[in-house]
Image (cartoon, helix red, strand yellow):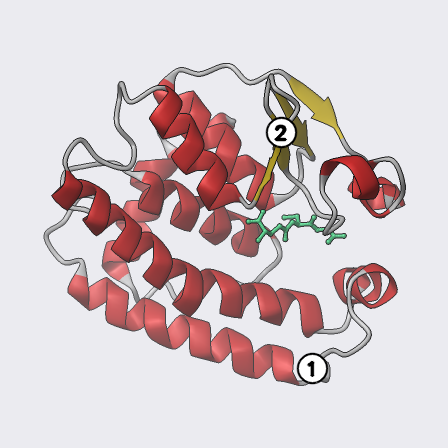
Amino acid sequence: MLFYDYHDAPNPRVVRMFAAEKGMDLPKRHVDVRTGENHRAPYNVEINRTGQVPALQLDNGQILCEILPICEYLEELQPDRPMIGATPEERAETRMWTRWLDLKYVERMTEACVVRPGPIRDHYARFNYKTMLPPEAGDICATMAREKLHWLDAEMAGRQFICGNRFSLADVHFYVFLDFFEVLGLNFPRSCTWLTDYFARVSSRPSAAA
Ligand SMILES: N[C@@H](CCC(=O)N[C@@H](CS)C(=O)NCC(=O)O)C(=O)O
């Protein structure tokens, strides 16, 4: 297997952290997103035709894109140290929360980060989109995402992780993006006390260094 990676981006980090939790070592090749290597051949022709990172090339040559299916694949390859779940019920719970977090927080905050004025907007306007939301929509997207964090904060009271005592893909996905948006100044509200403790708890795991 070969993992096409870019160290500073959150989507590849989700797969790296997930693999680290499972004790899997993925051989990696760096793709230089900063210079647009991902939008040039051969990468956007032979590896990931959406021109994004990451991608996983399997030993039979098949290419997998999209981080959540890549994690699902790794879990099937190595079910030990389950990160999606050991039973149908656990797997359904993990997928339920991963999807909710993706739709309500990760995607909306990503939109905020992409459409607000700055180098990320410039990059996406150059390589990814002909049509984009206006820059001022960034604040609205961020407010919508934070509203859902307030709801989540109350809902999670008493839990260690998103799926209770079980550290799962939902946590990896959520944590990596919380951390990425923190670095960009799109912070989570510190009045969310469960979330503040949770963020510190997950940050202290060795896999967070992946
Ligand atoms: N839905 C995709 C998202 C991939 C994505 O947004 N990748 C970002 C990095 S985190 C990227 O390649 N950005 C650079 C670009 O689009 O030029 C996945 O699950 O892998």
Q: Dot 2: few (<14), some (14–19), or many (≥20) neighbours within 10 Å?
A: few
Q: Would you name the residue on which mark 2 appears?
A: 62
Q: Secondary structure at mark 2?
A: loop
Q: Check disc 1 and give the amino acid type.
A: Leu
Label drawn at residue 115: none
Is 191 rendered above or below residue 30? Answer: below
Judged by depth in the image, the label closer to the viewer, 1 or 2, is 2
Camera-side residue of 86 and 181: 86
Residue at disc 1, secondary structure: loop
Position of residue 137 in the picture relative to residue 34 (left or right): left
The reply to whether callout 1 and callout 2 are in contact (CB within 8 Å) is no
Q: In the picture, residue 203 is in which quadrant? A: top left
- Along the horizontal axis of the image, is 100 left or right of 185? left
Ligand 1 within 8 Å of disc 2? The answer is no
Question: Residue 133 got which mark?
Answer: 1
Disc 1 packing (10 Å; few <14; some 14–19; many ≥20): few
Q: Is residue 206 visible?
A: no
Mark 1 or 2 closer to N-term?
2
Residue 175 appears left or right of 63:
left
Say which of 89 and 35 sits in front: 89
Q: How far across and how far down the image is residue 166, in percent?
A: 18, 37
94 sits left or right of 17 in the view: left
Q: Residue at x 50, y 34 (%)?
A: 15
Q: Is residue 167 visible?
A: yes
Alpha carbon distance from label 1 to label 2: 35 Å
Residue 55: image x %, image y %? Answer: 64, 36
Q: Position of residue 101 (x, y in %)?
A: 37, 60
- Asked whether mark 1 and ligand 1 are closer than 8 Å, the reply comes as no
Which is more toward the observer, 188 or 85? 85
Tell me which amino acid carries mark 2. Answer: Gln
Extreme-left residue of the structure: 158
